[in-house]
Image (cartoon, coloured by chain):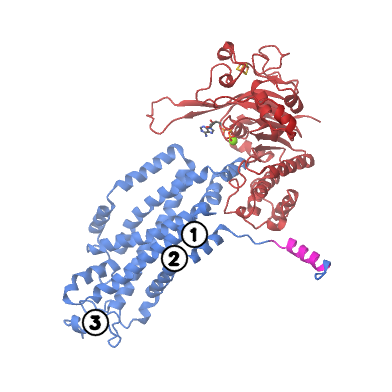
Amino acid sequence: MVFKQENIKNLALVVAEQDVKGRSLWADARKRFFQNKAAVAGMVVLIIVGLFALFGAQVSQFTNDEIDFMVIGQVAELGGPSFASGHFFGTDDLGRDLFARVVQGTQISLMVGVVGAAIAVIAGTLYGATAGYIGGRIDNAMMRTVDILMAVPYMFVIILLLVIFGRSISMLFVGIGLLSWLEMSRIVRGQTLSIKNKEYIEAAQATGVSSFKIILQHIVPNLTGIVAVYATLLVPLMILTESFISFLGLGVQEPDTSWGALIFEGAGTMQYGTLWQLAFPLFFFVITLFAFFFVGDGLRDALDPKDR
Amino acid sequence: MSTSLLKVEDLRVSFSLKSQGDMPWTKSRVLQAVGGVSFELKQGETLGIVGESGCGKSTLARALIRMVKATGRVVWMGDEELLGLSKSQMMKYRSEIQMVFQDPLASLNPRKTVGQIIAEPLRTHNPKLSKDEVVAQVKAMMQKVSLLPNQINRYPHEFSGGQCQRIGIARALIVKPKLIICDEPVSALDVSIQAQVINLLMELQQEMGLSLVFIAHDLSVVKHISNRVMVLYLGKVMEVADRDDLYDNPRHPYTQALISAVPIPDPKIERAKDVILLEGDLPSPLAPPSGCVFRTRCAKAQAICGEIAPELKAPEEKEGTVLALEKESTHRVACHFE
Ligand SMILES: Nc1ncnc2c1ncn2[C@@H]1O[C@H](COP(=O)(O)OP(=O)(O)OP(=O)(O)O)[C@@H](O)[C@H]1O
Ligand code: SF4
Ligand SMILES: [Mg+2]
């Protein structure tokens, strides 16, 4: 015998003693997600854009409202992107540093997207899960309310809000927050309805676990997959909404800016030969949206419950 | 010794169905899923309940633990009537009556570890237990159902169907119940594993003095484990008798058909025996046949069967003494020609 009987016995004992680590569904999903190249690339892009928004201001040699009088009036000739002048992305039509402005616009746009999605996640999940779990008349009333709110032309309402209460970032958040959770609550409610009839919920009810605990411990953890997917797809939608409003000239207020506002300005000056004013904000806008969609797609594939 | 644990009298469950497009004033249709079931279960014994899919077995089980609205009486240990209890009064009995479900994997939350799943009833009923105490009890229980205690941190999807059902059994046993209602606990398992799970249940029953209500859709599964067997058809009891009595001497045409369909291991006998085929489909429970509910598929049906519903009684019992449960071992049949 090559192995000593004694050793094998000891090994078996040790193996039996130690608690084996489980492989949770999350761990499985993480592994699948990291096998998806497009999703990983999307995540890398998002991290880079995030770092750009956070630390870009330190790199920049100008602030977003500082006018460079050297280039004013000659933007097409002198305001182009160059390292020598310190305007890495060139300047805008008023001679302000475009790099600084893109950094600041990225901050606003990402914040709008993330805050909108966060409101949707919290309000939508709680509202939808409650309606779905309670069911019956309360569910009916809650969901018809959502239907009615959804029928309101929200763009019109947001524009009205901005016109009446004046343009401000907080008003923009209020407007976007008001509409973002509606779709989420519907999705969550639908999912809750199907989870509610699972036998493990019945098992919990049969042993006397309270409804509150069932929602928190059994329903919400099984919702996180779909909520995470939908939230990542919601961020670009929020960014698009904000951009559209800014494009209409109703978004953030000068000197603050956002991707939409920058693209709007860049598009307006395109014919004067200052194409970079459009190209840089548009580039960030497009890669971020694509990155979010790829990550959302990757999450959906990774978390697909049918797969397990 | 053999005291009554659970006495059920005339249990009825009906669902009122509304379809999507119905107007608020449309009358909803009534589906009687359980139509007057009575039985008595003694401590340490097993009642097998058999019937086709859709005959109301699960609904009956769920009515016993107040998961659906029911009428009738469910008497627990001779004194407490469960159907009339409030939600908080019922809590005490939720630990004494536990349930094991049909689909082993679906009855376990995929996001929780085995340890968390088994501990849930314990945490609910003994919230004061310390964490270590809970883990110790869970591990001991895993050992009891032949699971390796070191697997406590694994997730349900890492186990086979049979192991998942052991987890479900461990979860039911952790609060030391007096009665376990097993709703088709082996229907989703391979035949070889069915036997293991049934044997495990019988061992645990011996060891812990459990009573079981064991639901299955065919007679061969409950034969081994039951003391008494009840045959259901469209929510009604067709026949109820002690195990050997029922298998050796089935008196109801439906039971006879079910028993004739059970394969016999000896090929000679198997080939020679007559299988009574059940013709036609199960009638819709929304529109059950008049009179005897079995008459649409019964070979012996006569005119009277469509007019008068036969009562469940032993031949020696007089008409009208339906609930005479004093002799528990009586063989009762619901058929006019018996
Ligand atoms: N919540 C409910 N609402 C309406 N009808 C129901 C409900 N639950 C069950 N039913 C109906 O009651 C009848 C009995 O169902 P039940 O689930 O008790 O059958 P079963 O004998 O357990 O069948 P299976 O062997 O398939 O599990 C069926 O016709 C079913 O459609
Ligand atoms: S009462 Fe009639 S229909 Fe019903 S089982 Fe007996 S013979 Fe068949
Ligand atoms: Mg069932």
Chain name for mark 2: A
Using the image, tell me which numbered label, if any, was put on residue A80.
3
Secondary structure of the residue carrying tag 1 is: helix
Does mark 3 have its CB less than 8 Å from ligand 1? no
Q: Mark 1 is on which residue type?
A: Ala
* Picture coordinates of residue A191, whole percent (x, y): 46, 48
Let me know if residue A10 is in the magenta part. yes
What residue span does the magenta drawing correspond to?
A: A6-19
Residue B9 is at least partly visible in this image: no
Q: Main secondary structure of the magenta part?
A: helix
Examine the rendered structure and indicate whether residue A32 appears above or below residue B122: below
Q: Mark 3 is on which residue type?
A: Gly
Image quadrant where one finds the C terminus of chain A: bottom right
Chain name for mark 1: A
Does mark 2 have its CB less than 8 Å from ligand 1? no
Looking at the image, is mark 1 or mark 2 earlier in the sequence? 2
* Picture coordinates of residue A113, whole percent (x, y): 36, 62
Using the image, tell me which numbered label, if any, was put on residue A302.
1
Q: Are marks 1 and 2 in contact (CB under 8 Å)?
A: yes
Image point 49% across, 59% down: which residue?
A302
